[in-house]
Each structure stands twice: as C-alpha cells, then as structure tokens.
Amino acid sequence: MACMAMALPVATAAVTSAAAASSIRRSTARVAASSAATAVASLRRGRRYLSTYEPAAPLHHEWVVDGRVLPPGETPPPAKNGERGTVLFLHGLLGSGKNLRGPAKRLTKDDGGLAALLVDLRGHGSTSALSSSSGRGGATLSPPHTLEACAEDVIGTARSLGLVGDGRSPVGVVGHSFGGRVALEYAAMAQAGGSSADVRPPRASWILDSVPGSAHGSVADVVNAVSAVPIPIPSKNHLVEDLTKNRGVDKAIAMWMTTNLTKSDCGNGFRFAFDLNVALEVLDEFPRQDYAGRLRAAAGGRMGGGTLSSGRSSVVNVVMAGKNGAWTDDVVAEVEAVGRDVAGRVRSHRLPNAGHWVHVDDLDGLMGLMEGSFG
C-alpha cells in the first residue's frame, strides 16, 4: 500500500537524548527573558485540582533490576532482603522510557532493594499507538491530553501492576523535564487521595530540570525542523541527511532522532514513534500548570502547614541544571519559598556543570544527590 508524503504539524518541544545533550549544551544558556517571567507567573498562579480521567490500560513500560533491563513480560523477583521498592522514571517530551535507562540502571545496581519502572508516557514511544489528538489512535488514551491525564495514566499503570497499598506503592518517582511535571501531578494526586487513594504517595520525588512556565526554548528550531519532515521517511540515512542539509540540525541530534523511528502504517518507510499532536496539546499545559501548588501538594502540605488527606509527608527534590539560564534568581527564590512553607520538604539542588540533560551531563552528581532518598 502506498503512502502519501505529508509533513507533521509544527510543534515546539524539548527533546531528551544522550546524543543530543552533548551537541546542544551551549544553547541552554540562551533562554528568553520572557520565559523567566512566565516561569515566575506560573509559580504564583493558583488553580484548584480536579481530575476525573480513568485510563483503561497500562502504559507501555519496562523494568530495570540490578542494573539490567528485564525482557518484556518479566517482572522483578523479590530482593534478597525482602520485597523490592519501585521507583518510577518518567521521560521528557519527544522521548521514551529508554532515555532514562542510564540512571535507572545505576540506581538499581547501587541499591539491590530497588526496581525501576520506566514508562512511555501518552503519545510517546510504544504508548503512542494508544493515543492520538483525534482519539482515533485507540480507546485507551483519549483527549484531552493534559498533564493531569498523563499522571492518571501513570497511576492506572501502577494500579494494573499491583503497585498499590502501603507495602507495594512506588517509593519514588523521577521525572525529567516534561516527565518532572507529570511526576509532580502524580505525587500530588497520590497525596490528595480520592480515586487515587490506593496508590500511596512516594517517599521522594526527583524533578530533573523542569522549569516552571513555558517549555524550554533552546531546541524549538530542532523540533520545528522535525515537524516539517515529510512522512513516510524512506530511511534512517535519509532522515539524517534531510535534517542536517535541509533544516540545519546538528548531526548528533539528527542521529538521535533516528532512534525515534518506527515502521510507517502503510509499510513503506518510517514515521516518528511520538505523536506531535499529543505533544502540542501537552505543551499548551506547561504555562498553565500551578507549579508552586503542585510542589506544595506533592510534599503533602498546604500553605500554612496543613496536610493533605493522605496524612503522609514526602520530600520533593528539584534539581536545577547549572547551565540552564531559565533558572533565574526569581524562579529559584519562589521554589525555595515553597520549601519554607512546607517545613523543608521541597528542596532545591543545583548541578553546576550540567545542562538540561542532567542525567547525561552529570550522572555521578545526580546519583550522589539521590543516594538513600527512597529508603
């Protein structure tokens, strides 16, 4: 069956990749002043939490245990000293769970009592077949594609895997960029109880370079270039040549984009594994997220020291890339102010030598910060 070539809709997003990280570190410092103002506004904005989304099937996922990725369908065996604790890993926009294999392998190798669950969020990786902007991609993950819906997907996945109750709920969540925003929603929902009461709040949440406000702007040109690539793509080499010669994309980033390809629906060539329409809808949510409110709720507190219905406090760690200029003094001050509101349960950390991809640029530093936080 022949495919008609067509370009994807133009999107603005942040890409998560080990290869891309080394190529675009220099651009992370070039963030518009308007983005910083938006970030502070996002911290100050209040919005009441409400969600009624109920996913029907789990997200695509893989397990990492003792430093290795388990084969599909295999579940973690009990740890030598008892049941393993689960740490969720949530990737960035246009990425997939495998982007976080590095820190997941390191964490589970260093601590044999932990297992890592890496998921492909809605519209991404192998989960993208379950969702579309029109809702025709599957009955499971229908619009609207919001941050709250993304978090509900994660809760539904945990529930489907039996990760519920005090003894089985995930002990931690790690999210990079877009995944960090979803992690905040997930932890806040777990604290709020209600329909999510069976999934208990994590002991620790790690939010990796998720800056409040609009999406990180340093790679907008790359995403716009990717959006303009005609589909289907004849070959991986063709994609690299198109992006580098016709659209000015760095070769390392173009090479990484080939890992996001899957066979086209018509069997002729390739398409991108992610759904840019879903990404666009999620991006619209970024400046609307009540970042400060989610930090406070995820830590199990309210303004003035009150607690949420779960009755369990949790530590939320915000990791800031030292080379990301979006972390202005005003934005950092707002995050620290939330920490004071909740008796220090929101903590900020800076990795001075890291760009946006902190888990690539300074994995040793990141793992040093995380050590012992899930126990």
Image: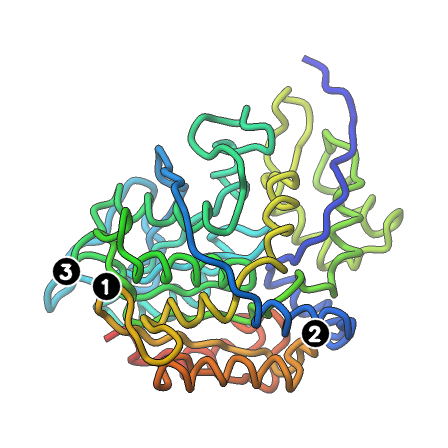
The disc, 1 or 2, on the residue closer to the chain's N-terminal end is 2
Nearest to the observer: residue 355 or residue 142: 142
Mark 2: few/some/many CA within 10 Å (<14, 14-19, 20+): many
Nearest to the eye among marks 1 and 3: give it: 1
Image spot of residue 22 (x, y percent): 67, 70
Classify the position of the C terminus by image quarter: bottom left
Image spot of residue 84 (x, y percent): 19, 62
Nearest to the eye among marks 2 and 3: give it: 2
Q: Is residue 57 above or below residue 245?
A: above
Residue shown at 53%/35% (left/top)?
143
Instruction: Provide the secondary structure element on which disc 1 rests.
Output: loop
Residue pointed to by mark 1: 310
Image spot of residue 324 (x, y percent): 66, 77
Residue pointed to by mark 3: 167
How far apart are labels 2 and 3 at the CA level? 41 Å
Classify the position of the N terminus by image quarter: top right
Nearest to the observer: residue 203 or residue 92: 203
Residue shown at 11%/69% (left/top)?
81
Q: Amino acid at mark 3?
A: Gly
Nearest to the observer: residue 287 or residue 178: 287
How far apart are labels 1 and 3 at the CA level? 15 Å
Q: How is the image coloured?
A: rainbow
How far apart are labels 1 and 2 at the CA level? 33 Å
Image spot of residue 213 (x, y percent): 63, 65
Residue shown at 40%/54% (left/top)?
118
Residue pointed to by mark 2: 36
